[in-house]
Image (spheres, rainbow, N blue to C red):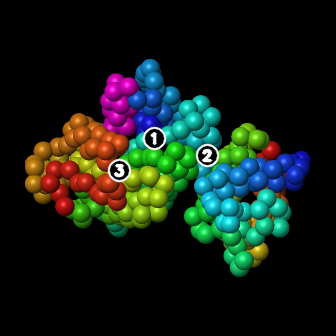
């Protein structure tokens, strides 16, 4: 299993969760991680940097010979009014969230294709269907992830690879640390189930998508908290 | 400097793999002149995808360097490197000469 964005937050949780379940997990983030786990190997890699990602996949292929699951968790956000959003921020968000997701899907699918089996889970967000003010670029980047998910599901179906996405609500991570409390309260008020998300809400969905029995489930986006 | 014959062999190995599930009448010939894609080509788009991906892996195994055959240059060239086995080999030799 390969998980991106594993330095902290949801990614780190997923590493702990799946290594505890017995998975051999490979992860990456731009920097090193401050933890070590049996069955976990870390790569320092920017998900949008093609040569580094190709090298990581070459190492995975050489060492493990296969890849069954990709969890495309790496993502960045920036809460800003559109009139105050620097262009560099737009490039950064699109690079990590869209280019990174694309690149990882492409390289993972090459490796999964050989065995005719693969499970890819991309990360969307409720900010897209909620049309969240202040998150224009983030929401747009994740809308692109949804489109990628839906089209790749069709392109990769003949290789036995499913591609789905989970759309978390805000979870208490660094990603939302800078969001004012009243903004967070009003966002949560728009969910059917009004609470912050928890890490286990996300692994519950990824568990479902990556099950071998979920081989007839692809191109789906599952938003948490009753958001649609 | 990479020998073109080495690359042709790498592509032939990939052709063996692509051919394996095909009936004899649809199998690709292991020759530089074999037309892969475009007019007179013997592969459908999925067949080309498989051949390119397997060739990429074979190159990686043989030379210990990851390459991306379907890069921007390949896609924008007037004469596609995916036209024949020979043009594909030339393109891979060029990529490896740049990367080794």
**Disc 1 residue crowd, few under 14, some 14–19, many 20+, Cα 10 Å:** many
Rounded to the nearest angstrom, the CA distance separating label 2 from label 3 is: 27 Å
Quadrant (top left/top right/bottom left/bottom right) for the N terminus of chain A:
top left
Residue wearing tag 2 = A54
Please tell me which of labels 3 and 1 falls first in the chain.
1
**Disc 2 residue crowd, few under 14, some 14–19, many 20+, Cα 10 Å:** some
Residue wearing tag 3 = A215
Chain ID at mark 1 = A
Residue A98 point in image, percent of width and height: 45, 58
Identity of the residue drawn at 32% across and 42% down: A211
Residue A17 lies in the magenta stretch: yes
Identity of the residue drawn at 56% across and 47% down: A114
Q: Are marks 3 and 1 in contact (CB under 8 Å)?
A: no
Residue wearing tag 1 = A68
Identity of the residue drawn at 31% across and 44% down: A213
In the foreground, A161 or A223: A161
Residue B9 point in image, percent of width and height: 81, 50
Single out the residue that lies furthest toward the front. B24
Q: Which residues are magenta?
A: A9-22
């Amino acid at each position: 299993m390969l998980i991106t964005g594993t330095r902290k937050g949801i990614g780190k949780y997923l590493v702990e969760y799946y290594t505890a379940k017995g998975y051999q997990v490979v992860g990456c983030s731009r920097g090193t991680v401050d933890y070590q786990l049996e069955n976990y190997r870390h790569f320092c890699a920017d998900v949008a940097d093609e040569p580094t990602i190709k090298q990581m996949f070459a190492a995975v292929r050489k060492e493990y010979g296969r890849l069954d699951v990709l969890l495309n968790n790496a993502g960045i956000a920036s809460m800003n009014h559109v009139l105050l959003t620097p262009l560099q921020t737009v490039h950064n968000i699109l690079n990590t969230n869209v280019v990174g997701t694309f690149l990882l899907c492409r390289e993972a699918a090459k490796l999964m294709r050989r065995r005719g089996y693969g499970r890819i889970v991309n990360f969307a967000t409720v900010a897209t269907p909620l049309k969240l003010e202040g998150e224009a670029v983030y929401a747009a980047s994740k809308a692109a992830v949804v489109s990628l998910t839906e089209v790749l599901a069709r392109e990769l179906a003949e290789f036995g690879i499913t591609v789905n996405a989970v759309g978390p609500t805000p979870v208490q991570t660094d990603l939302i640390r800078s969001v004012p409390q009243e903004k967070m309260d009003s966002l949560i008020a728009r969910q059917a189930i009004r609470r912050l998300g928890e890490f286990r809400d996300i692994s519950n969905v990824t568990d479902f998508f990556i099950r071998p029995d979920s081989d007839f489930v692809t191109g789906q986006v599952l938003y948490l908290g009753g958001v649609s | 400097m990479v020998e073109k014959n080495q690359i042709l062999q790498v592509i032939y190995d990939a052709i063996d793999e692509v051919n394996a599930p095909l009936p004899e009448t649809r199998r690709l010939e292991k020759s530089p002149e074999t037309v892969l894609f475009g007019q007179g080509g013997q592969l459908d788009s999925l067949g080309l995808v498989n051949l390119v991906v397997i060739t990429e892996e074979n190159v990686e195994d043989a030379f210990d360097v990851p390459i991306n055959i379907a890069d921007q240059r390949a896609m924008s060239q007037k004469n596609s490197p995916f036209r024949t086995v020979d043009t594909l080999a030339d393109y891979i030799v060029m990529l490896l000469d740049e990367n080794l």
